[in-house]
Image: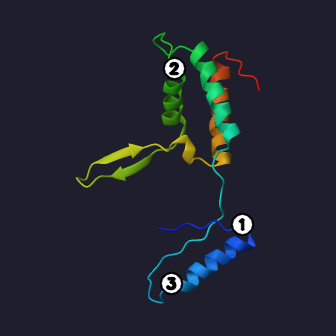
Amino acid sequence: MRTFYVRSPSQREAFSKWMAKLPEDAGLEITVREHKGRRTIEQNARMWALLTMISLFVEDDAGAKHPKEWWKEQFRYELLESREIRLANGNVVHDWPGTSELDRADFSRFMTEIEVWAAERGVALGD
């Protein structure tokens, strides 16, 4: 599989040259869609700061504290939509996207939901 990101004339030209080299009977399916950038480094750093604050000040229902990695997984399962995957044996399992798969807007919503959750429990997260 080949992915092209076309943001400049030179990238458009590279894509055109690649297309021109394809055999006429290549049998390809080509999808064109707007590219949505993945989360930024700054967004990722902010998420880990939020999760660190939560890990320091929030206990679970049983009164236990957990590391930031545990909280990340909790929020991932609670806040992100799972995908159903049918295995070869017919069983269906659920898989949740990693936060690195989220685009900037979805990642921003994810962090906002975490902030709201934390604020409801008295954790002031700041900027």
Q: Nearer the viewer, residue 122 or 2?
A: 2
The span from disc 2 to disc 3 (Cα, nearest Å) is 51 Å
From the image, state whether disc 2 or disc 3 is nearer to you.
Answer: 3
Q: Residues within 10 Å of mark 1 (few under 14, many from 20)?
A: few
For badge 2, the amino acid type reads Pro
For badge 1, the amino acid type reads Arg
Please tell me whether mark 3 sits on a helix, a strand or a loop: loop
Along the polypeptide, which appears first: circle 2 or circle 3? 3
Q: Position of residue 105 (x, y in %)?
A: 68, 47
Residue holding disc 1: 7
From the image, state whether disc 2 or disc 1 is nearer to you.
Answer: 1
Along the polypeptide, which appears first: circle 3 or circle 1? 1
Asked if marks 3 and 1 touch (Cβ < 8 Å), the reply is no
Give the vertical position of 60 relative to 21 (above or below): above
Specify the farthest residue to the bottom.
24
Specify the farthest residue to the right.
127
Labelled disc at residue 22: 3
Q: Position of residue 34 (x, y in %)?
A: 66, 64
Residue at 64% x, 65% y is 5
Q: Quadrant of residue 16?
A: bottom right
Along the polypeptide, which appears first: circle 2 or circle 1? 1
Give the vertical position of 77 relative to 59 (above or below): below
Q: Nearer the viewer, residue 111 or 47?
A: 47
Please tell me whether mark 1 sits on a helix, a strand or a loop: loop
Residue holding disc 2: 67
Q: Position of residue 87 (x, y in %)?
A: 29, 52
Q: Nearer the viewer, residue 80 or 107?
A: 107
Q: Position of residue 68 (x, y in %)?
A: 54, 23
Residue at 71% x, 73% y is 10
For badge 3, the amino acid type reads Leu
